[in-house]
Image (cartoon, rainbow, N blue to C red):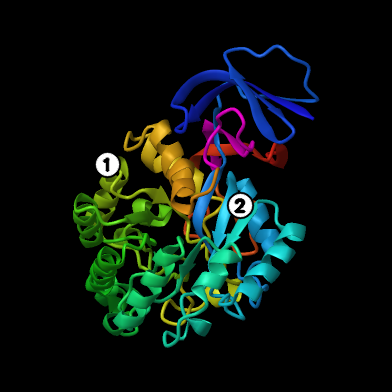
Amino acid sequence: MKTLIKNGRVVDPASGLDGRYDILIENGRICDVRDHIQTTAQSVIEAENCIVMPGLIDLHVHLRDPGYTDKETIETGTRAAAAGGFTTICAMPNTKPVMDTPEKIRAFYERAVVSASVNVIQLGAITVGQNGTELADIAGMGRAGCHAVSEDGKSVMDGKLAEQAMKTAADNGIGVFAHCEDIRLVNGGVVNHDIAEKLGLPGIIDEAENVITARDIEIARRTGAHLHLCHCSTAGSVELIRKAKTEGVQVTAEVCPHHFTLSTEDIPGDDANYKMNPPLRTREDVAVLKEALSEGIIDTIATDHAPHTAAEKSRSMKDAPFGITGLETALGLAVTELTEPGFLTMMQLACRMSYAPARILGIEKGSLEIGKIADVVIFDPAFEYTVRSETMLSKGKNSPFIGRKLRGRVLYTLRAGEIIYQLR
C-alpha cells in the first residue's frame, strides 16, 4: 500500500531536511522524499501548514500493566501515546509483579504485540522486586529486549550495588535510567521546600535530587556505563550534567513538560494534580531547565506519564500518590512553551522528542530518511485547543493542564505507514 503525505514542512534531524516536501510511504517504509511527488497512492494526506516529523519517542512512561490496570493498560496507554504523536514509548518496570526477569519481559512483549497501538520497549528493573538488595538478571533482560534498566520510582540507595548494576549494564551494552532521589533527604516530603510552609505540607529539598545525581555520575564515570538521568528538575542537576558532559562522562538527561512549564508559584493549593516526583520547583529552576534544553545539555523531553484513579487524586497532596499524565499534552506544551517563545527551533524539538531518544536507545528510529520505517507524526503548530479530560484516551485524567489552552495539535500519527491516530 502507498501513502502520500503532501505539502508538509518536513523537519528531520537525521537528514537535516527542513522545508516543504512530499513523502511517499510504501510497505511501511519511507520510499521517497522530494519537492513534489507525482504518483497514485491509496491514501493521500494533505499536510499544508503542518509539521511532519519522525514519530515521537518517549523514554519514560508508566503503563501500569500488569497489576494496576485500574489506572492504565497497554491498550489505553498506547492509544493515548498515539494521540500525543508518539510511535515508540519505554514502559517503566515498577508494575505488579515488577519486571525483573527475562521471562517477564518476554511475556510483556507477547501481550504488547496483541494490544499495543505503538512500539513499546519494556525496561527491566535493576534489583529483584525493586527491593534494592539483590541485582536482577540485567544481562538476561537485555537479551530479552529491554534496552535499559531502571529502578524508576526510587534510587538504588546502596552505592556498591548501584556500581555493580552499572558495570553489568555497561558490559552488556544497555543503559541505566536513573531516578535520582535520596529517600533519606525526602523524609516524607510531598512538595518543593519553598512552598511547603505556605501549604502546610512537608517539603522536599533540592539536595534530594542533586546528591544522587552526583553519585550516579561518578559511578558512570568509573564504570563506563551509559547513564540516563530521568526527570531532571533542579538547576543543581543541570550544572552537574553540564560538567559531566564536558569531562566526557557518558551521560544523557531528560526533562518533563510539567517541569519546564510549571513552578511552585502555579500550585493553586492542596491539589494533588500538582503532586509529582520530583516536585515542581522554583521559577528560577524552570528558566535553567529551558536554557539547558536549548543548549542540548538536557538531551530529551520525556513525559513520566503516571496515570492514577480519580479517587486517589481526590485526596490531599499528603495522602495522594505522586504523578500526573503526560502523553497527550507533551507536544502541545512543547510547542506552546518552547518553540513559540523561541527556546527551541522545530528542528531542535524534533531532535529532543524523537532523534535523540532513538540514539539513546540505540534503535533505528527518529528519522524520515529513505528506507527507514515510516513512523511519522503530523501536527498543526497553530492549532489552538483546550485540554479536556473527556477527550483524553488515557484512563488517567490526573493532569494540572485540564482547561489550559495549548497550540500544536496532532492530526495524524503513523506507525510503519499505518494511521494509528487521526483527529476527528
> Looking at the picture, which amino acid does disc 1 mark?
Glu
Residue 243: assigned label = none
Q: Position of residue 216 (x, y in %)?
A: 29, 69
Q: Nearer the viewer, residue 256 or 314?
A: 256
Q: Nearer the viewer, residue 381 or 146?
A: 146
**Pointer 1: what residue?**
295
Q: Position of residue 164 (x, y in %)?
A: 36, 77
Q: Determine whether label 2 and label 1 are within 8 Å by CB.
A: no
Q: Is residue 26 left or right of residue 14?
A: right
Q: Residue at x 45, y 74 (%)?
A: 151
Q: Is residue 41 left or right of residue 181?
A: right
Q: Residue at x 26, y 61 (%)?
A: 234
Q: Residue at x 26, y 57 (%)?
A: 249
Q: Residues within 10 Å of mark 2 (few under 14, many from 20)?
A: many
Nearest to viewer (mark 2 / mark 1): 1
- Closer to the chain start, of discs 2 and 1, is 2
Q: Nearer the viewer, residue 421 or 225?
A: 225
- Residue 334 in view of the camera: yes
> Looking at the picture, which amino acid does disc 2 mark?
Ala
Q: Position of residue 185 (x, y in %)?
A: 26, 81
Q: Which residues are magenta?
A: 365-385
**Pointer 2: what residue?**
81
How many labels, in total? 2
